[in-house]
Amino acid sequence: MSIKIFENTDELLKEYSHVYLLGKGLNLSMLSSVAEFSGKNMLFLVPSDCYPEDDVKALNEYRMISAEETKNILDLYRTYEFSDKFHFLSSPSDQNYGSLMNYVRNGILTEEEGYAAMLKQ
Amino acid sequence: MEQAKYNEMSEKLNSLIEDGRLSGKRILLFGHCNATEELADLLMSRGFTVEAILDNNASKHGMSYKDIPVIFPAEFVDGQTDDSIVFIVTRFYEAMNRQLRELGFDGDVIKLVDYNTYADYSLSDETVNRMKTRVHHGEELTGCLNDMYDHPFKVFCPFNALGDIYIMMSYWESYASKRGIKKPVFCVLGKVLSGIIRMFGDYSVEVYPQRDLDSMIQYAIYSQDETSFIAHQDRPYVVDLHKALSFKRITLEEMYCCGVFGLPRDTVPSVPAYGLKEYDGNIEIPKGKSVVFSPYAKSVTAIDEQIWEDAVLHYSNLGYKCFTNVVGDEKPINGSEPLDVPLAEMVSVLEKAGCFIGIRSGLCDVIRSAKCKKIALYPDYNYSDTKWKAIDIYSIEGFDNIALEAGDTWETIKAKIQ
């Protein structure tokens, strides 16, 4: 992990009320639609190897990051909870713990509610 | 609060008192919960005055605990804070501390119990290196477990709560079947939890201290190990299921069935068919003419003693023998006999007694399958920081689920029982 990433992360957490790192398999149009109405000062970190920039332009504030930066910051997130303002959004069916998307898959939440819940603090 | 956590809180407080850190200070507590009330009691028993309990939940405002008012943090920080000290005994220390700092408070904010080893809101080199070492420790412990059981599927249970473990286990069989998991090893925090797991089958269970288990869980997160599963609806920080409660009422069972395990809503929960035992104690329990009361819960606000005493008097006058389920040095309700039986025998005891009346705690889950009259009493509090009442989340099929309101007496409660 480079020092640069830590410094940037710290700065981003001061600048934005919430920072979201996007994982694979998200419905970006749903995410941007929900984000638009949340009214928060939020930043999305978008891995360039997961999503083309054209697909994320609907997000109000985003920053494309490289695969290496993604790995570094994900490693950090998986090492400890360094902030409650940093969140990793993903839609896996195979992760080794529970997920909001399980509620969507099982009809407890609508997809829109699931995405809104992801951004809820 | 668990005894070990209480001891930790008490020892840290003693040390601060000896160092003179409380002298002349206004004392405030942050986060109104059962643990905070225990801390308030402890402080008052040492002769200190608690000025206020800070809480962000608007529904708690106007409430008080033993004349200590519950107020918003901003109300306190707007006042004189230079001579104040704030104690926190919840797992949200990091977020609460940050909130106070952002409000401008620069006095002492002291964590008296370490409920959450996962969080440290710092990106300093020291913190990052310490947390990396913790992950490495978890890797070593996981390696030992893998060696001991020849690389089993590992199920981590991060929280010491009977009810969570019981409900988790009632959906485990369906999950294991879906994933083809044959021989899991459950990793838990105490022998009592181990007993709950073994009610459901002849499973391997390992008991770890909190810090070790947390390290192993952190390693499972870090490594994304596909042969590990973290079986809790709310912990650790990567689990986001609680956020759904802003939109929908979701019962604890649905949290485990659908949220944690990803099973369909109509999945039928298992009942413990393996480890339940017949009561073989010496206490005579008149069949169908006894009531077992359970007034104690470690994480729920207590119900007024008078209500329990009046209930015991009521049933005694009707010719019932009354018992209080006690553990360790807990006292029986006046007019009742103490009953201290292993959890695996409790269903048998209740089926003999005929009636159970308890505060809604994990014990109510453990006795779900007992064929008898079962009444769960729910103190008036909100589930976590949600708009839902405890009864909305915890109500149990097959019980009379009774929500208590301010001013309730045994007479008013009795009128609500079917």
Image (spheres, coloured by chain):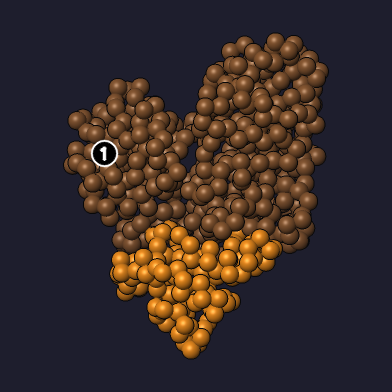
Chain colours: A orange, B brown
Disc 1 is attached to a residue of which chain? B
Picture coordinates of residue A48, whole percent (x, y): 47, 84
Q: Amino acid at mark 1?
A: Ile
Residue closer to the observer: B190 or B309: B309
Quadrant containing the C terminus of chain A is bottom left
**Position of B195 compared to B308: left or right?**
right
Q: Residue at x 52, y 43 (%)?
A: B382
- Mark 1 is surrounded, within 10 Å at the Cα level, by few (under 14), some (14 to 19) or many (20 or more) other residues, namely many
Say above or below: A42 vs B98.
below
- Residue B152 occupies quadrant: bottom right
Say above or below: A6 vs B275.
below
Q: Badge 1 is on which residue?
A: B85
Quadrant containing the N terminus of chain A is bottom left
- Residue B279 occupies quadrant: top right
Picture coordinates of residue A115, whole percent (x, y): 55, 68
Q: Is residue B181 visible?
A: no
Say above or below: B229 vs B87.
below
Q: Secondary structure at mark 1?
A: strand
**Position of B126 compared to B195: left or right?**
left
- Residue B88 occupies quadrant: top left
